[in-house]
């Protein structure tokens, strides 16, 4: 892959909690449109690495670049803006807003990004069709199955047209068949939009949608 297509780059990341090094000098590059699975035992540093890459957590040492911009060089407002506009998340437990409908949950991040109403409505309509939830557009989250909720979460992540999606065990709360359908949806939608994906998972099955697997143990990447 062309080095100019690198969308995420972490250099010598160190993150400590007390005396313990959760990340112990991590280097990783992810190219635009590349899907990378991040695997390792519990406590290995997977979620901490994801949080540092996503600008949620600040490393004690090292640098994270998103599209060539070093995140630690940004002010609070600049970092919040780049996170809203360029990074999306998919979580194990969906994190839908319970009082908002399917349509409103998908639309909400676009509102925060001040996407014009006509464009918001257009994107929501297309996404509802793409994830197969047109008939559920007015349903509340507690009226949905787990698979439907995760499809809403996928649509919500895509709505802001990010350059990278960070997914933390997105099928961990689903049965195997539903999980496989969600994984295929994530693969197809990120591939068609050339969006990079970093997928934290314990599932070998989930890694099959990715171009490569990166293993982390004791805060270090293993070859």
Image (tube, rainbow, N blue to C red):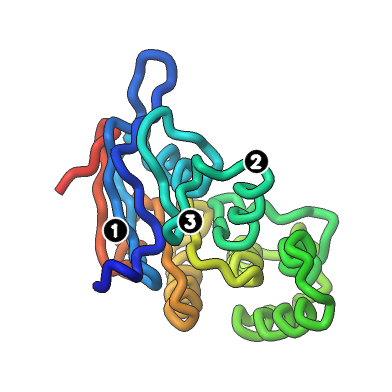
Q: Earlier in the sequence, mark 3 or mark 1?
A: 3
Alpha carbon distance from label 2 to label 3: 23 Å
- Do the residues bearing badges 1 and 2 touch, measured as CB atoms within 8 Å? no
Evaluate whether residue 142 shows in this view.
Answer: yes
- What is the crowding at mark 3: few (fewer than 14 residues within 10 Å), some, or many (at least 20)? many
Q: Which residue is mark 1?
A: 204
Q: Which residue is mark 3?
A: 167
For marks 1 and 2, give the one nearer the viewer: 2
What's the residue at 59%, 53% (across, down)? 83
Residue 125: percent from left, percent from top: 73, 84
Q: Is residue 179 above or below residue 71?
A: below
The foreground one among 161 and 133 is 161
Q: Is residue 94 above or below residue 12?
A: below
Residue 127: percent from left, percent from top: 65, 80
For marks 3 and 1, give the one nearer the viewer: 3
- What is the crowding at mark 2: few (fewer than 14 residues within 10 Å), some, or many (at least 20)? few
Alpha carbon distance from label 3 to label 1: 15 Å
- Secondary-structure class at tag 3: strand
Q: Is residue 221 above or below residue 14?
A: below
- Secondary-structure class at tag 2: helix
Q: Which residue is mark 2?
A: 76
Q: Earlier in the sequence, mark 1 or mark 2?
A: 2
């Amino acid at each position: 892959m062309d080095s100019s297509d690198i969308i995420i780059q972490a250099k010598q990341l160190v993150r400590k909690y007390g005396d313990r090094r959760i990340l112990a000098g991590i280097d990783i590059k992810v190219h635009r449109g590349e899907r990378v699975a991040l695997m390792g035992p519990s406590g290995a540093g997977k979620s901490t690495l994801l949080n540092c890459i996503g600008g949620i957590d600040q490393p004690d040492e090292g640098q994270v670049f998103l599209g060539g911009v070093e995140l630690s060089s940004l002010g609070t407002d600049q970092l919040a803006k780049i996170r809203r506009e360029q990074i999306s998340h998919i979580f194990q437990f969906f994190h839908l807003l319970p009082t908002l409908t399917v349509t409103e949950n998908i639309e909400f991040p676009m509102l925060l990004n001040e996407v014009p109403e006509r464009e918001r409505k257009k994107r929501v309509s297309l996404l509802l069709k793409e994830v197969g939830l047109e008939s559920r557009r007015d349903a509340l989250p507690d009226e949905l199955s787990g698979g439907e909720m995760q499809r809403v979460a996928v649509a919500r992540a895509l709505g802001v047209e990010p350059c990278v999606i960070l997914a933390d065990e997105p099928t961990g709360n689903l049965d195997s068949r539903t999980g496989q359908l969600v994984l295929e949806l994530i693969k197809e939608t990120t591939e068609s939009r050339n969006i990079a994906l970093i997928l934290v998972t314990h599932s070998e099955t989930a890694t099959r949608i990715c171009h490569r697997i990166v293993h982390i143990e004791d805060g270090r990447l293993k070859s």
